Amino acid sequence: MRGNPFHNKLVKDSEALFLKFGWHTDTERMFCIDNITSYFDLFARDGPLKIACEVETTSRHAIDNLRKAQAIGMPLWIIVPTRRVRRQIQQALGA
C-alpha cells in the first residue's frame, strides 16, 4: 500500500471488517476510465454490491477521491480515524 503505516493499518482493519462479513476485497484497486488510471485504497464487493473506500487521515484529498468515485459511478465510503477528521471532510464536501 502507498500510505504511511497508520493509513495502511486503517486500510487493513477496514478490510478485515468486510472479510468478517463475507465480502470480497482488493486493496489498491485500479480503475481505468477514459485513459485515466485511478486507485482506491480498498474495494469491497458482495454479489452485485460494490463499494470503493478511501482512508483519509486529513481532509486534503477528500474532494478528489469523491470525484474519482463519481467518474466510475461507484459509491464511496470515506473511512476516517477521528470525529475531527470526519467533520473536516464533511465541511470540505459541503455535507
Image (cartoon, rainbow, N blue to C red):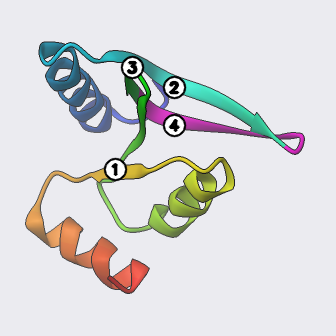
Asked if the residues shown at circle 4 and circle 1 are in contact, with their CB atoms under 8 angstroms apart, the answer is no
Distance from the alpha carbon under mark 4 to that under mark 2: 5 Å
Is 94 placed above or below 51 here? below
Q: Where is residue 67 shown, x and y percent of the image?
A: 60, 62
Q: Is mark 4 on a helix, strand or loop?
A: strand
Q: What residue type is labelled 2?
A: Glu
Instruction: Describe residue 14's horizontal placement relative to residue 54 as left or right.
Output: left
Q: What stretch is highlighted in magenta?
A: 34-43
In the drawing, what numbered circle is on residue 77? 1
- On the image, numbered disc 2 is attached to which residue? 28
Q: Distance between the residues labelled 2 and 3?
A: 20 Å
Position of the C terminus by quadrant: bottom left
- Disc 3 designates what residue? 47
In the rendered image, residue 17, in percent from the top left (x then y), is placed at 14, 24
Residue 25 is covered by the magenta coloring: no
Q: Distance between the residues labelled 3 and 1?
A: 18 Å
Residue bearing mark 4: 40
